Every structure is written in structure tokens, then in C-alpha cells.
Image (tube, rainbow, N blue to C red):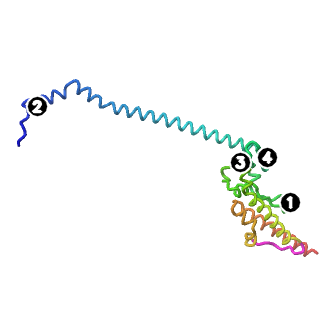
């Protein structure tokens, strides 16, 4: 069935409709979504600036808090106990966290903080206070560290004391239980080097005394 023919004045009606005031309003309204998009973008930009400013303020506050908590420990103390929070705050300045040899002695200082953080399952880099409850839960491990340190001292004393005046190799040292514990604490290498160096120095002095005698 064929379609009816279009009205004779259809083209004129379409042109008239396009030029009507209603269509002009509609076409000008097409710019409204663009204006809305610009407003949304401006609002998002303002929110982003506010969020960035808030983040910076939080970072600054956190930094100040960390500095304040670290400085709360007297410089001559390894740690302090906070009764209100039931936690230990360690002194984390380099003087207390790096292995060192006491001058004019054979005494090697093993830093306590990295060992305790590791053995109580804390992340050392976060520098958080260590809860008393966690220390109690890990008490056997902490006691083991002390016990094995004493055992290593006994081994070294027996090995280096006259008249034997021997030394210890790094491979043998690494097999001791104490050094195995330190291998998880990030200080093994420095401690191992200091011990081997001092053992060799002591052995040389003992040998010289033997030769003089």
C-alpha cells in the first residue's frame, strides 16, 4: 500500500518551525550542559585543592607527632615506659640504633631497638611504641636473645683468653644461635664484622705476648 503524499507546504512548515522563538530558546539551551560541565570541573578542582591541603596538614601533624614522641626519650636512655599507654618508646637516634665498638675495650654494643622491634613483630621503620602486652607475648623470644648473647660471650672468652689466644672465623660465628637471631634484625653483618675484627686483634696481641715471653 503506497504512502500518502506529503502536504504541499511541508517544507515551508519545517523552515518556519526552525526559525520559531521556541526553537531558538532550545538551541541556545544547548550551551547549558557545557556551562554545567564547567561548573562541575571548577567544583572538583576546588575539592582537590582542599583535599591536598588537608593531606599536607595531616602529614605535617604526623611528622610533628613523631618528632615529639622520639624527643620524649632522654638522650641517655635506651627506652622509657609510658604507663598511660602501657607501651615502651625506644630512643631511635643513631647513637642507640647502630652497632659500635666501645673505644679502648673489646666490648661490642648490639643495638637493642632493632632486635626488640623484630622479635615482637613490629616494623622498625614505623618507629611505633611497643605495647607491653606484645612484649609479654614474646617474652620467651626476648629471653632467648639474652641467653644466647651470654652463650656467645662465653664462647668468645674461652676462645680468645690466654694461653689459647685463638680466633673465630665468620662461618663458625654465623652458626651460633645468637647470630642467627641477629640475622632477622638487620644488624647481623655489622656485628659479625666487628666481632671478627676484634677477635683477630686480640689473637695478635696474645701471640705477641707469647713471643716476648
Closer to viewer: mark 1 or mark 3: 3
Task: Label 2, secondary structure: give it.
Answer: helix
Give the magenta part as a residue range: 162-169
Q: Mark on residue 129? A: 3
Q: Position of residue 20 (x, y in %)?
A: 20, 25
Query: Would residue 119 be found to the left or right of residue 152 on screen?
Result: left
Closer to viewer: mark 4 or mark 1: 4
Closer to viewer: mark 3 or mark 4: 3
Dot 1, how many residues are within 10 Å of its Cα: few (below 14), some (14-19), or many (20+)?
A: few
How many numbered marks, from 0 up? 4
Residue that badge 1 annotates: 104
As measured in the structure, the alpha-carbon distance from the residue carrying label 4 to the one carrying label 1 is: 23 Å
Residue that badge 4 annotates: 75
Task: Label 1, secondary structure: give it.
Answer: loop
Closer to viewer: mark 1 or mark 2: 2
Residue sitting at the far right: 213
Decide if residue 189 is in sight here.
no
Quarter of the rendering occupied by the N terminus:
top left
> Looking at the image, which residue is at 5% across and 41% down?
2
Query: Would residue 82 be found to the left or right of residue 212 on screen?
Result: left
Q: Are marks 2 and 4 in contact (CB under 8 Å)?
A: no
> Looking at the image, which residue is at 81% across and 72% down?
167
Q: Earlier in the sequence, mark 4 or mark 1?
A: 4
The image quadrant that residue 184 belongs to is: bottom right
Q: Mark on residue 10? A: 2
Q: Nearer the viewer, residue 40 or 160?
A: 40
Q: Position of residue 108 (x, y in %)?
A: 80, 61
As measured in the structure, the alpha-carbon distance from the residue carrying label 2 to the one carrying label 4 is: 96 Å
Q: What main secondary structure does the magenta stretch of the protein show?
A: loop
As measured in the structure, the alpha-carbon distance from the residue carrying label 1 to the one carrying label 2 is: 111 Å
Quarter of the rendering occupied by the C terminus:
bottom right
Query: Would residue 19 be found to the left or right of residue 86 on screen?
Result: left
Amino acid at each position: 500500500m503506497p504512502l500518502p503524499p506529503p502536504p504541499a507546504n511541508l517544507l515551508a512548515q519545517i523552515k518556519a518551525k526552525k526559525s520559531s522563538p521556541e526553537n531558538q530558546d532550545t538551541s541556545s539551551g544547548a550551551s547549558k550542559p557545557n556551562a554545567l560541565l564547567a561548573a562541575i570541573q571548577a567544583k572538583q578542582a576546588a575539592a582537590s585543592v582542599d583535599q591536598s591541603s588537608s593531606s599536607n596538614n595531616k602529614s605535617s601533624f604526623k611528622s610533628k607527632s613523631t618528632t615529639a614522641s622520639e624527643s620524649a626519650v632522654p638522650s641517655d636512655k635506651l627506652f622509657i615506659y609510658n604507663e598511660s599507654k602501657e607501651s615502651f618508646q625506644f630512643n631511635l637516634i643513631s647513637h642507640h640504633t647502630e652497632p659500635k665498638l666501645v673505644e679502648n675495650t673489646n666490648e661490642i654494643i648490639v643495638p637493642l631497638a632493632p632486635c626488640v622491634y623484630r622479635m615482637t613483630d613490629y616494623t622498625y621503620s614505623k618507629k611505633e611504641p611497643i605495647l607491653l602486652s606484645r612484649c609479654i607475648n614474646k617474652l620467651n623470644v626476648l629471653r632467648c636473645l639474652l641467653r644466647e648473647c651470654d652463650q656467645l660471650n662465653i664462647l668468645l672468652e674461652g676462645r680468645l683468653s690466654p694461653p689459647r689466644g685463638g680466633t673465630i672465623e665468620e662461618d663458625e660465628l654465623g652458626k651460633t644461635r645468637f647470630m642467627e637471631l641477629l640475622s632477622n634484625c638487620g644488624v647481623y653483618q655489622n656485628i659479625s664484622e666487628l666481632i671478627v675484627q676484634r677477635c683477630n686483634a686480640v689473637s695478635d696481641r696474645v701471640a705477641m705476648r707469647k713471643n716476648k715471653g
